[in-house]
Image (spheres, grey):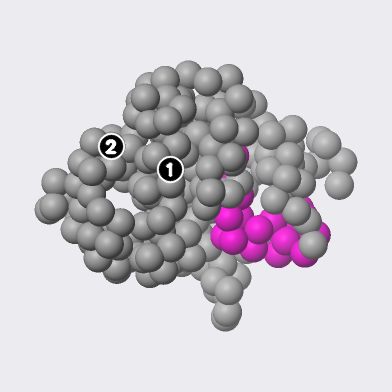
Amino acid sequence: MGKQTAKKDLKRFYDHLYKAFGAQAWWPAKTRFEVVVGAILTQNTNWTNVEKAIKNLKAEGALTIKAMHALSEDRLATLIRPSGYFNVKARRLKAFLSWLHESYSGSLDRLFKVAELREELLSVNGIGPETADSIILYGAKRPVFVIDAYTKRILTRHGLASDDASYAEMQKLFMDNMAHDEKVFNEYHALIVRVSKEYCKSKNPLCSECPLGDYL
């Protein structure tokens, strides 16, 4: 696919999705630390389950860096149980907090000012590209495009990426063909999630009703 074709298709997709759904106001978090926690908790589960875990953390008064760092791993696992894989995720959250305290004195302000933020996040056990990029885009508010299963589904079904395309290749498609605008990347990713959940489903997609149906 040529560069101009990719640029045209990506803009056209965005325009049609925005017209169909409007602004998504994503990520639904009141603090940057809540974004970090949500990005880790949403691994291998849906957002409804994450919301239940977040609600438990808020009720416990544990949704701050200081409070969660002081919490035992067992208690944290109990609180985030609704998110699934709760023991693994509790270890990952505690690993991130320990690293944040050791490397940045427990300060997200200091972390988010680092030039090589992505490399730093990827060095933490349990944080992969999608989680790191979610933290960078929605927490640090830097322009990086997040690739997830929904994005891959849209790209492959519409011929913008091959079935075996890597995370980096799919991300490069957006980074090379769109202006690096944090707000647009934020909105675009949220719109892709919305259309995937409602129309471009993994099974029995509603192509004839989908805002992107004309482009199959």
Q: Position of residue 88 (x, y in %)?
A: 43, 63
At x 54% / y 71%, what residue is drawn? 201
Q: Secondary structure at mark 1?
A: helix
Whether residue 63 sits left or right of residue 32 in the image: it is left
Residue at figure coordinates x 49%, y 42% from the top left = 134
- Compared to residue 135, the image places residue 207 above or below, namely below
Q: Residue at x 43, y 46 (%)?
A: 95
User: What amino acid type should be assigned to the residue bearing mark 1?
Assistant: Phe
Q: Which residue is mark 1?
A: 96
For mark 2, what is the residue? 65
Q: Which residues are magenta?
A: 145-163
Give whichever of 190, 165 is nearer the camera. Answer: 165
Quarter occupied by the C terminus: bottom right
Q: What amino acid type is highlighted by mark number 2? A: Ile
Residue 187 seen anywhere in this rendered image of the structure: no
Q: Is residue 78 left or right of residue 132?
A: left
- Residue 203 part of the magenta-drawn span: no
Residue 127 rendering spot, x and y as whole percentages: 53, 48
Residue at 41% x, 68% y: name it.
85
Percent across and percent down for residue 46 are: 41, 65
Q: Looking at the image, is 216 positioned above or below residue 107? A: below
| Residue 3 falls left or right of residue 81 | right
CB-based contact (under 8 Å), mark 2 and mark 1: no
